[in-house]
Image (cartoon, grey):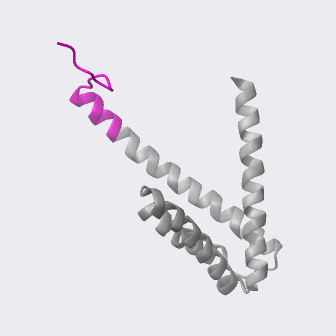
Amino acid sequence: TTTNQALPPYTFSEVLVSQLVGVPVGALIGIVISIVGTGVLHGVSKLFGGKGSLIKTFQLNVYSMVPSVLFGWVPLASLIASFYSLYLIVIGAGYLHGLSRQRAVFMIVVLYILSMLFGIITASVTGSLL
């Protein structure tokens, strides 16, 4: 008889090492992304006339990610959580940086356009390296 295995069998030590390395590396990547994202959000909010501090921007960035972190693994809930995270950034940017609601929405649109351009450039550069 044949068995249908989707994954090759792993030993306990292989799984343990992958977890011992993968979890801290994933946490470190998450921290770096939070810090870089805060810097970009703070810079753009300053360009739009924001008056908040970098620490408050970091709090806004991290707090706004909570719904996506908690529900990002649930298919429909992840979409709702993403929009709620955007809503929290708009409300928070308005409150913490003294921006009008329209200005905060426009700031988020600019951030998303910049992130899409960064993704396209990154994909082009890495694709040309392959």
Residue 43 makes an appearance in the image: no
Decide whether residue 6 is among the magenta residues: yes
Residue at 51% across / 54% down in the picture? 30
Regarding residue 86, the answer to whether it shows in the image is yes
Q: Would residue 130 be counted in the magenta stretch? A: no
Q: Is residue 113 left or right of residue 56?
A: right
Q: Which quadrant of the figure contains the C terminus?
A: top right
Farthest residue in the front direction?
1
Q: Could you say where residue 3 lies in the image, as x and y percent from the top left?
A: 22, 19
**Which of the pair 52/108 is nearer the observer?**
108
Q: Where in the figure is residue 24, as x and y percent of width and height?
A: 40, 47
Image position, residue 96 (x, y; %) = 65, 84
Q: Residue furthest top?
A: 1
77 in relation to 91, above or below: above
- Is 16 placed above or below 90 here? above
Residue 32: x and y, percent?
Answer: 56, 53
Looking at the rendering, the stretch of residues picked out in magenta corresponds to: 1-19
Horizontal side, residue 73 vs residue 41: left or right? left
Quarter of the image with the N terminus is top left
Dividing the picture into quarters, in which one does residue 12 lie?
top left
Residue most extreme to the left: 1
Work out whether residue 94 or residue 16 is closer to the camera in this orientation and state it.
94
Identify which residue is drawn at 75% across, 43% down: 120
Residue shown at 58% from the left, 74% from the top: 60
Vertical arrangement, residue 68 with respect to residue 4, above or below: below
Foreground of the two, 31 or 61: 61
Q: Residue at x 21, y 14 (%)?
A: 2
**Would residue 117 be found to the left or right of residue 59 on screen?**
right
Front one among 22 and 77? 77
Q: Quadrant of residue 59?
A: bottom right
